[in-house]
Image: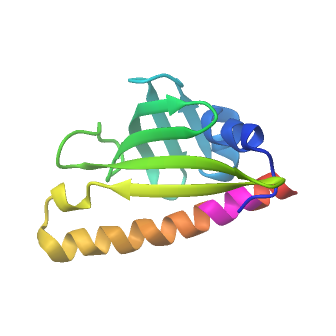
């Protein structure tokens, strides 16, 4: 739960300058279906994504490559779907990431990716909350 209206949360998710503040070190974003998203971290590299769905201010989805400097495609990417639900004076932000079963490397490697990404989302959502509630 974030103590901010859905419109502010939406902007933090879909505007490159904001996304590059709370989630990555910088970002480029073409906010339309099929548009490109590039998330850059000094420590991790550049991760490429393709916008799959954009329904203001309710749902935003991107397919992103698992490894840096790779274009997302079948077998190397997952789909992250953000859903915003107004609740009182705030917004519930839900992230559902799917596609791990189609990644290469077998079940152990897939489970490792699930764990790593779940940990990343916990930190990312905490950063979003902190960014919007400051």
Q: Nearer the viewer, residue 86 or 4?
A: 86
Q: Residue 59, how many percent across, how many down?
A: 53, 39
Residue 122 falls in image quadrant:
bottom right
- Residue drawn at the location 51% of the way across and 38% of the way down: 60
Q: Is residue 33 left or right of residue 41?
A: left
Q: What secondary structure characterizes most of the magenta part?
A: helix
Front-most of residues 9 and 90:
90
Classify residue 15 by image quadrant: top right
Disc tally is 0
- Residue at the image point whose x is 77% and y is 61% from the top: 130
Which residue shows up at 81% across the image and 50% down it? 4
Query: Split into 4 quadrants, where in the image is the C terminus?
Result: bottom right
Where residue 80 sits in the image (x, y, percent)?
42, 49
1 up-or-down from 51: above or below = below
Left or right: where does residue 81 sit relative to residue 104? right
Give the magenta-colored segment's residue range. 125-129
Q: Is residue 128 magenta?
A: yes
- The residue positioned 61% from the left and 34% from the top of the image is 14
The answer to whether 55 appears left or right of 104 in the picture is right
Q: Is residue 51 left or right of residue 7?
A: left
Residue 42, x across and y down, in percent: 55, 52
Q: Is residue 58 above or below residue 2?
A: above
| Color theme of the render | rainbow
| Quadrant of the frame with the N terminus | bottom right
Q: Position of residue 3 (x, y in %)?
A: 81, 57
Q: Residue furthest front?
A: 88
Q: Is the residue 19 above or below the residue 115 in the image?
A: above
Magenta stretch containing residue 115, yes or no?
A: no
Q: Toward the viewer: 106 or 88?
A: 88
Looking at the image, which residue sits at the far right? 134
């Amino acid at each position: 739960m974030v103590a901010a209206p859905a419109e502010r949360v939406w902007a933090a998710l879909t505007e490159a300058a904001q996304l590059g503040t709370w989630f990555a070190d910088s970002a480029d974003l073409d906010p339309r279906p099929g548009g490109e998203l590039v998330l850059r971290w000094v420590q991790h590299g550049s991760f490429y994504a393709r916008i799959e769905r954009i329904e203001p201010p309710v749902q935003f989805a991107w397919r992103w490559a698992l490894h840096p400097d790779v274009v997302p495609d079948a077998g190397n990417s997952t789909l992250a779907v953000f859903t915003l639900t107004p609740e009182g004076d705030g917004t519930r932000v839900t992230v559902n990431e799917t596609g791990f079963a189609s990644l290469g490397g077998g079940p152990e490697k897939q489970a490792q990716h699930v764990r790593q990404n779940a940990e990343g989302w916990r930190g990312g959502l905490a950063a979003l909350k902190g960014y919007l509630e400051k």
